[in-house]
Amino acid sequence: MTSADLETILARHGAIEDDPHAATSPPLYQTATFGQSRADGFDAFDYTRTDNPTRAALESLLADLEGAPHALTYASGMAAIASVLRLARPGERVLCGRDLYGGTQRFLHRYLEGVEAEHVDLARSEDGRCPALEAALAEGGARLVLVETPSNPRLDVTCLRSVCRSAHAAGALVVVDGTAATPWLQRPLEHGVDVVLHSATKGLSGHGDVTAGIVATRDAALFTELAARRNAEGNALAPFEAWLLLRGVRTLGVRVERAQETALEIARWLESREGVTAVHYPGLASHPGHAVHASQADGAGVLVSFRAESAERARRACEDTRRFTTAVSFGGVASSISIPHHMSHASVPPGAAPPPEPELVRLSIGLESAADLIADLDAALGPPSDRSPEAETLSAATVSLHA
Ligand code: PLP
């Protein structure tokens, strides 16, 4: 699909079919139930837990964006992930990469009962296969392989075609969490992936006012199974959230294009900044996954992470910025900064992949001026502030209940 197609989809798709008033903005059907024309069957919509016109309009737009016939939306990214991971039955295994959102790891290791979750090296070899993954698959019982690319927070890149080749040969499904890239930049189904999912709370909505998740697949049987489970479990996206997401997603392309220009500028600047020991951004030629990412995505995105020379310096950088909000989540119009070790990954349970180090800082770049953001970061990374180091350290007990 060309980017012109995507632009048109974002601007024009997602209308409510057969709208008698031809509303130019899809109406919000804020209703739990729909009157039926007969008592011995159902009309197109009967109950919002099952289906709702506003949500259906959103889902058709998202499916078009992903190049899929089907998409489902959920109350959050985690609701989407949990539904897909629960396709693995007790006794089966889930294989996944070594860098994954902390909440996904919490679900995999604490709540996916009876299923063994293992982190493996997804690096590809010269022949376009993934040797460590193939070795793990050879042990048998793997239902699915879960990949985040680029990953949160280290922005590791995984070759989707290589993972698909190895996983499909062993009969495992490939599921990609594409949250960091959004479908504007990367459409994993085009590379042979079975299921793509996102936290739409991030770049897809773009305004930090919705929690939502999406799943898209070309596999009709998988779609039917996931839709039936969503109806049974009642974790679909509510109509108002669907309406907000439908509005927010319209500007996805212009937001991502603008913000990733700034992200590249900041990543390049950080590479030469004293006090920064490593910069992770797939748009940098120095990133080990630069070429692979360029072969499967149309841009490097809005997330940049870097290592400060000490945990204390990382903490101060977060607390001393004035233009970045210290917050979990990312992909909004306003830039944010976080230390994943203390925040988004604080809930990583023992036995999961090694958590991000406390020196790692993650930036989500928004729509502010690049010059302002760089000047602000420069000041924050500069001379130590006089804030006491103990002041706002979050206790592990507190953060474990958070994002
Ligand atoms: N996937 C990734 C990569 C994330 O970063 C997050 C949240 O930060 C999620 C999934 C979970 O999404 P949500 O917070 O919408 O449940």
Image: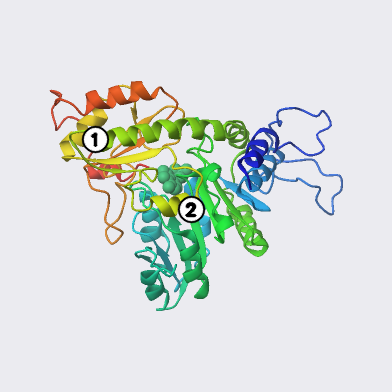
Instruction: Classify 110 as above or below 45.
Output: below
Choose between 348 and 59: the one closer to the eye: 59
> Real-space Cα distance between discs 2 and 1?
27 Å
Q: Residue at x 52, y 34 (%)?
A: 210
Q: Quadrant of the C terminus?
A: top left
Left or right: 391, with 195 as reference point: left
Depth check: give the residue in front, 268 or 187: 268
- Choose top left, top right, bottom left or bottom right for residue 246: top right
Residue 174 seen from this side: yes
Q: Which residue is mark 2?
A: 295
- Residue plotted at (63% across, 53% down): 231
Q: Give the residue type at disc 1.
A: Ser
Q: Residue at x 69, y 36 (%)?
A: 31
Task: Name the residue rendered at 18%, 26% in the picture.
Answer: 382
Task: Please give left or right for residue 96 compared with residue 186 in the image.
Answer: left
Is 159 rendered above or below residue 391? below
Three-letter code for the amino acid on which mark 2 is drawn: Ser
Is mark 2 in CB contact (under 8 Å) with mark 1? Answer: no
User: How far across and down, in percent of the image, does residue 50 sit?
Assistant: 67, 49
Q: Is residue 179 above or below residue 336?
A: below
Taking the view exactly as shown, the residue that stands out farthest to the bottom is 139
What is the x, y in percent for residue 59?
65, 44
Q: Is residue 89 in view from this perspective?
A: no
Sort mark 2 into few (<14), some (14-19) or many (20+) by Cα contacts within 10 Å. few
Q: What label does residue 272 carry, if any?
A: 1
Camera-side residue: 295 or 74?
Answer: 295
The mark that comes first in sequence, 2 or 1, is 1
**Residue 299: percent from the left, percent from the top?**
48, 42
- Does dot 1 land on a helix, a strand or a loop? loop
Q: Quadrant of ligand 1?
A: top left
**Picture disc at residue 143:** none
